[in-house]
Amino acid sequence: MECRVCGSLAAPLFETEVLHRHKVTYFECPTCDFVQTEYPHWLNEAYSSAFTNTDTGTLQRSLILGKSAATLLFFAFKAKARFVDYAGGYGTLTRLMRDIGFDFYSTDLYAENSMARGFDAQPGTYEVATAFECFEHFVHPRQELEKILAYSDTIFFTTQTCPKPTPAINNWWYYAPHHGQHVALYRPKTLAYLGKEYGLRYHRILNYHLFTRRPITTFVFSFLVVAGRFGLSEVVRLLMKSRTLSDAALLETNAQKDKTIT
Ligand SMILES: [Zn+2]
């Protein structure tokens, strides 16, 4: 099979049952190290609900990732600019980031933004796009990356990198064949390759990744991600002005305007 990242010939890894009924082969690319399923024809079934029933981590993830995001965006980017959360789900992270004070918007093709209503991202240019836990869902990583790049040339994202040597299907939970949504599993080499193709620098710490054209070093990126998680985000919170109340006022004004028009 042709690797969906670099086009090389990918070699079969193993076969397993996805969604408890489809026999599916996983492949690994010898050139860019990308691990991928065969073409995922089962996705309609896998996405009957945007979040899998077993995904208990949605809220916890937003809380933790929000701390690193707030710190990185505050110290390394223009904190007063606007930001977009790509594949933002129910809008949880967008609401959290607005509560801290960032001008955040959400976009998601599959889920309704119910937490950050009124703050849907319109096409345009954003300072940074965040994309948490969505790269592993991409059938065509290059096309998806291009969609995010249409919003921003800096992407702060998370996805668990596939260990080396490649774990057997039962030895790494992130394959998650029971829900069938993780069809793309990256190595640092894969992401560096992908970034280079689009003229992006690539930085990584643990499962946090950054694509950017800006001159930020891996050290600064790593420091801000880790320090944010362990307390520096509280300092950011003190220095920013929360939008919780002003957003309520803004939404109320907009609702009044809508009433006058209709
Ligand atoms: Zn490849």
Image (tube, rainbow, N blue to C red):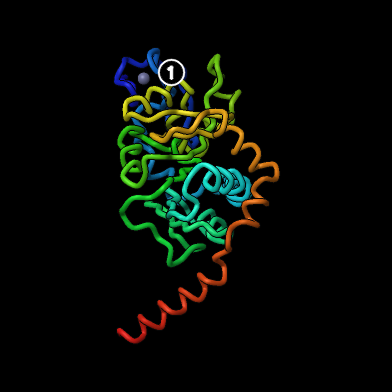
Q: Give me the residue at 33% from left, 21% from top.
A: 3
Q: Quadrant of residue 190?
A: top left
Q: Position of residue 37 (x, y in %)?
A: 41, 27
Front position in the image: 33 or 177: 33
Quadrant where ligand 1 appears: top left
Left or right: 191 as drawn, with respect to 245: left
Query: Which residue occupies the extreme right position in the image?
Result: 231
- Quadrant location of the C terminus? bottom left
- Quadrant location of the N terminus? top left
Q: With respect to residue 115, does 182 lie above or below?
A: above
Label 1 residue near ligand 1, CB within 8 Å: yes
Front position in the image: 198 or 235: 235
Residue identified by numbered label 1: 33
Q: Amino acid at mark 1?
A: Asp
Q: Position of residue 147 (x, y in %)?
A: 32, 42
Q: Residues within 10 Å of mark 1 (few under 14, many from 20)?
A: many
SS at mark 1?
loop
Left or right: 216 as drawn, with respect to 153: right
Q: Position of residue 40 (x, y in %)?
A: 37, 33
Q: Position of residue 212 (x, y in %)?
A: 41, 35
